[in-house]
Amino acid sequence: MTATLPPSVRSYHVNSGDGIDGLSLRTHEPRTPGVGEVAVAVHAVSLSFRELLVLRGQYVLPVKPDVIPVSDGAGQVIAVGPGVQRVRPGDRVTAALFPYWRDGPLTPAYLPQLGGSLDGMLTEVAVLPEQALVPVPPHLSYAEAATLPCAAVTAWNALTGDGPGIQPGQTMLTTGSGGVSLFALQLGKLLGATVIATTGQVDKEQRLRDLGADEVVNYRAVADWHTAVRDLTGGRGVDRVVDTAGALEQSLKSLAVNGHVAFVGSLSGDWPPLDPRLLFGVAATVRAVAVGSHAQFAALTEVIAAHRLRPVIERAFPFEDAGAALRHYESASPFGKVIIEIR
């Protein structure tokens, strides 16, 4: 083993359900990486809605007691365990949220996840399976790379994870301006789609256009916003919706015949009933998107590197202010990712 482990590291710990106030910062000895494991000095982590669900005790998958939270991070390899072959100290890496899901369909064997049933990235040194690691695109900073594992991979899966995926010349719709939606907008444009975005805030309309949205619909100004979407498509509807809001009824009403809804979740926590006739009316496909595999992550990073795509970052906080970062993310409706930097 090549090792340059520090004598001590700091990590945040929490029990799911204890909320942001339940976070505790502790100093402890770093764990030596075992067979097939890699120690990574974490330089930045990125917050997603998933982290709030873990803290609130609402996450759909198991969370271990006293977990080191947060799934998304990026850093530099500082030590490797026996048998490690793909990385070496000095490499810049990030890690897949589901570290054992290499490719193909998601199965129960692949459900262990960082910041849930496995310790996550809100630590100065994370010990990770080698197979989880993904190289950081050369043009990205650690902060930018930290935004990729959950939001960007989910967006990529939403656009490409169903066979043909979104095609050049097709029209797609993104809901809101959260992390997944912003990545879906950026990636949809790279893939040649026309993108319609929704928002409930006037001040975000131009920012979405500046990021590449061809049209923007304010759902507070137009309560039945699917009518505006259909008007913008000449009555045809869109080929794909990336639904991060749980607005399935209006998403389906926005679809063209044989359209596709990539259903990411519900930020509001509301799950309104759905009339099945809406599915049959346009022969719709609705697919639940659960982040993505290592293979999808690797394909995404190739596209990001080739096009020099840059993630949108709203604000960065120091490691010591992790609680403040989470409160800001929870309350501020940020346009772009909230980062915690580890110096």
Image (cartoon, rainbow, N blue to C red):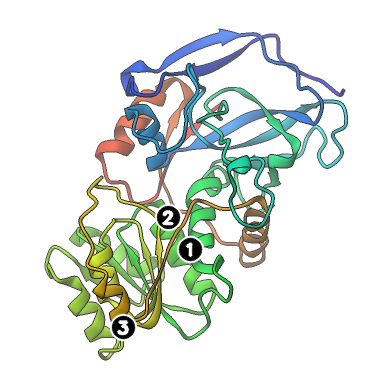
Circle 3 Cα neighbour tier, 10 Å, few/some/many (<14 / 14–19 / ≥20): many
Secondary structure beneath dot 1 equals: helix
Pointer 1 residue: 158
Task: State which mark lies toward you, 2 or 3.
Answer: 3
Determine which residue is flagged by label 3.
237
Task: Work out whether residue 61 or residue 241 is closer to the camera in this orientation and state it.
Answer: 61
Question: Which image quadrant is residue 190 in?
Answer: bottom right
Q: CA distance from mark 1 to mark 2?
A: 9 Å
Q: Please state which of residues 80 and 319 is positioned toward the viewer in this rendering.
A: 80
Which quarter of the rendering shows the N terminus?
top right
Look at label 3 and name its amino acid.
Answer: Gly
Residue 143 higher or lower than 201, as above or below? above
| Marks 2 and 3, the one that precedes in the sequence | 2
- For the point 27% across and 46% down, the residue is 333
- At 23% from the left edge and 63% from the top edge, which residue is drawn? 274
Question: Is 39 on the left or on the right of 48, as rendered?
Answer: right
Residue 84, quarter of picture: top right
